[in-house]
Amino acid sequence: MNVPLLDLKAQYKSLKSELDAALLNTAETQYFILGPEVQKLEGEICEYLGAERAVGVSSGTDALLLALMALDIKAGDEVIVPTYSFFATAGVVSRLNAVPVFVDCDPVTFNIDPALIEEKITDKTTAIIPVHLYGQSADMDPIMAIAKKHNLKVIEDGAQAISVQYKDGKSVGTIGDVGCYSFFPSKNLGCFGDGGMTVTMDDDIAELLKVKRVHGGKPKYYHSMIGGNFRLDAIQAGVLSVKLPHLDSWSQKRRDNAELYTKLFVEAGLAAEEGKITLDENNKVLLPKAVYKPESSNENQASSIKNYHIYNQYVIRVENRDELLAHLRENGIGCEIYYPVPFHKQECFQDLPSSKDEYPNADFAATHSIALPIYPELQKEQIEFVVKTIEMFVK
Ligand SMILES: *Cc1c(COP(=O)(O)O)cnc(C)c1O
């Protein structure tokens, strides 16, 4: 049986006529960059997430870079980032000649461990970039408290987490100063190429995002500040407006798939409980855990929070990870390692002081993690086949 890591054609087929019409609309209007389609999408995103303002941009990476520029993060500033994330989270900091300062991750959620942030703060620290990795919120309450105490900006990297809700039901991205999203095709809400979005609750920051999106000219050709070309294409906005109304149902299917994985792993006797963090004889597969899952006993909270985890990735941890990866691929199962090298081990970051510190949880994740297929259109039989194939390997 063939089980791809992701099947974008299945999603396209389900919305083909509407998506084709959106593409053709751009061909008819010949209005390619920013314009009414982008404005329409920005309004829809605000409404959907409960954000005050949204500014469409060229990618998730550019969303982060633009956010740092709008918040005036400068050369020499220190910016706290998790050491375990996609490269862009730290790369954008270095591109501004600011200094990424790494923090280890929590062993259950893979997200930045708030208890380890304060020891990394100096008088040069100006910002924190929490990442909502794999589709679950970072622990924002303690992060916001630390930011307030030390007067730091908070840029949320929600590239894998658009629509995710934190404890009280608030959408991630609307909690810090700026929220950043990616519409790269493999994200939960993907466009037909590169695209991204910044959101904020602050009108002044929104104005800076808008002006710096077009080189910082205001009025055009008159520059009191420097920006870049961070514009979103109309064609991508059109595609995203078609897809956005379906995002919640896709996320629900991803959660259903995750639940089925958990059930099958437990039934196979491979994993005792979600959220365990050490591998031993009885626990051969560590499962991901949705930490901010509403308690079913608390009816009010349960009804307000739906997207406690949107499983952009379903990441398990196993011994002999590389052998399992090869075994799964031999059996036609798509899988991937997110991420094999934490920032503190990246060659380009070896000169950074914080690369010398210890990051045991990130090191463990980097050497034991493997992402399994979780996309919404995945069939029950395919999930059963993945678990059976893993069972054959570990037993
Ligand atoms: C994908 C991703 C980005 C970058 O988004 P692009 O649209 O590919 O530039 C940044 N951070 C994280 C955590 C991501 O997963």
Image (cartoon, grey):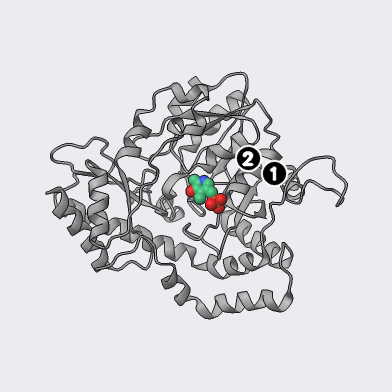
Relative to 373, residue 129 above or below: above
Residue 70 in view (yes/no)? yes
| Vertical order, 142 against 323 (above or below) | above
Give the percent coordinates (x, y) of residue 130.
Answer: 51, 38
Taking 277 as reference, is 219 above or below it?
A: below
Q: Residues within 10 Å of mark 2 (few under 14, many from 20)?
A: some
Residue shown at the point (57%, 78%) measured from the top left: 20
Numbered circle sitting on residue 177: 2
Q: Is residue 109 left or right of residue 43?
A: left
* Residue type indicated by callout 1: Asp
Name the element at disc 2.
Answer: loop
Q: What element carries label 1?
A: loop
- Dot 1 and dot 2 residues touching (CB under 8 Å): yes
Residue occupying image coordinates x 45% and y 76%: 13
Where residue 207 sits in the image (x, y, percent)? 76, 47
Task: Name the residue at 34% across, 35% down.
Answer: 107
Q: What residue type is labelled 2?
A: Asp
- Where residue 165 appears, as percent x and y from the top left, is 48, 49
Q: Residue 192 lies in what quarter of the image? A: bottom right
Residue at numbered disc 1: 202
Pick the front one: 151 or 261? 261
Quadrant including the N terminus: bottom left
First in sequence, mark 1 or 2: give its number.
2
Residue at image x 64%, y 63%? 41
* Quarter of the rendering containing residue 113: top left
